[in-house]
Amino acid sequence: MNPKIVVLDAETMGGDLDFSPLSRFGTLNVYASTDSYSLGQRIGDADIIVVNKVKLNRDNLKNARRLKLICVTATGYDNIDVNYCWQREIGVCNVRDYSTESVAQVTLLMALELLTHLSEYRAAVTSGRYTNGESPLCVTPVFHELSGLTWGVVGYGAIGSRVAQLASAFGCNVLINSRRFRRECAFEQVTLDELCRRADIISLHVPLNDETRKMINKRRLALMKNTAILINVARGGVIDELAVCDAVLREEIGALASDVYSTEPLTVTSPYNGVLSRSDVLLTPHMAWAAQEARKRCINEVGMNIETYLMGGKRNRVDL
C-alpha cells in the first residue's frame, strides 16, 4: 500500500516547517494553502489528509471516496465534521500536549511584560532618551515584582497545570479553578468567582464550549481587582470581548493580554481596535502555541498518528 497523503494548508504551521518526514508513509503532496475551488481536486484521490484550518464537512468530503484518515495539526478539531466522518468510517486524529511549554512560556512572558514594562525601558535606551538624559537612573513607568502576587489559573489541563508550576516557581500564591476537583493538585482550588475576587493575575486555559463561552463577562469582571491582569491564551470566545475592552477603558482592571480572538485575524469592527495603543494592553497574533520546537513536535505527533493508523491502531482518534 502506498497511500496518497495531502497536506492542505502548510503555511498555517509556519514557512520554516519541514513536512518531508511524512513521506515515509506514502506519496506526499504539500500545499501552502487550499481554497474552496481547489479543495475538491486535491482531496479527490487522497487516502490521508493533513489539515490545520481548512474546514472539512459533508459537502466537500462526499467525493473523497478513497479517504481513510484526517490528521489535524492541532488539539482542537471544530473545523472537521466528525459525525460525518464517523458515518463514512473516516478516522480523525488530533495532536495533544505538543504546545504546552510554548503556551506556558508566552503566558508567563505576558504577565512579566505587563508587570515590568520591559519594552518601554528598552525604548528609553534605543530612542536616545536615556543617553541624552541627565539622570543615570530611569524607573518610570513603575514596575512590580511577580513574587508575592496571587495568580489564578482557570483550567487545569496540561497547559494550566504547567503555568501553575511556573507561577509558583516565581513565588506566586497559585489558585486553581477546574471543572472538577483535582485530588493530585498541590494548589488551592476555588470557584471561578472567588478566583476573580482574589487573584492579581488571571490566566485562561480552557476549551471553548457551551460551559465556558463568555465565562469572563461583565459580572465577573466587576469582581476583579482594579489592578488585576487578565490573560487569555485559551479561545477568544471564552471572554465577552466587548465587556473586557470596556473594563480596560474604564480602568476597572489593571491590564489585558490576549493571543486569541473570537474572529481571527482581527476585523475592523473588533472591540480590540479601541484599546490597541494602550500600554496596559498586550495583544499577539495567535502565536503562543507556535514555538519552533512545538511545531516540530506537532508534525512528529502527526507522523505517529499516521503510522499507528497504518498498523491498525487508534492513536489520538477523536471520531470514536
Image (tube, rainbow, N blue to C red):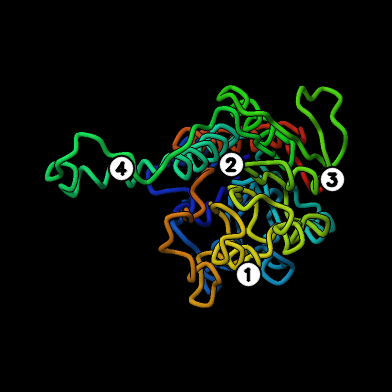
Please name the residue shown 54% across and 43% down the image: 289
Mark 1 in CB contact with mark 3 (< 8 angstroms)? no
Q: Amino acid at mark 2?
A: Asn
Mark 1, secondary structure of its residue: helix
Q: Amino acid at mark 4?
A: Tyr
Neighbor class of circle 4 (other Cα within 10 Å; few <14, some 14-19, many 20+) is some
Neighbor class of circle 3 (other Cα within 10 Å; few <14, some 14-19, many 20+) is few
Give the Cα distance between marks 4 and 1: 30 Å
Residue underneath mark 4: 121
Q: Nearer the viewer, mark 3 or mark 2?
A: 3
Mark 2 vs 4, N-terminal side: 2
Mark 2 vs 1, N-terminal side: 2
Give the Cα distance between marks 4 and 3: 52 Å
Residue underneath mark 2: 2
Front residue of this view, candidates 280 and 270: 280
Give the Cα distance between marks 1 and 3: 37 Å
Work out which quarter of the rendered image holds the C terminus and state it.
Answer: top right
Q: Amino acid at mark 3?
A: Leu
Neighbor class of circle 1 (other Cα within 10 Å; few <14, some 14-19, many 20+) is some
x then y, percent, for residue 114 = 47, 45
Q: Nearer the viewer, mark 4 or mark 1?
A: 4
Can residue 231 be seen here? The reply is: no
Residue underneath mark 3: 320
Give the Cα distance between marks 2 and 1: 51 Å
Mark 2, secondary structure of its residue: loop
x then y, percent, for residue 53 = 58, 58
Residue underneath mark 1: 242
Mark 4 vs 3, N-terminal side: 4
Q: Which mark is residue 251?
A: none
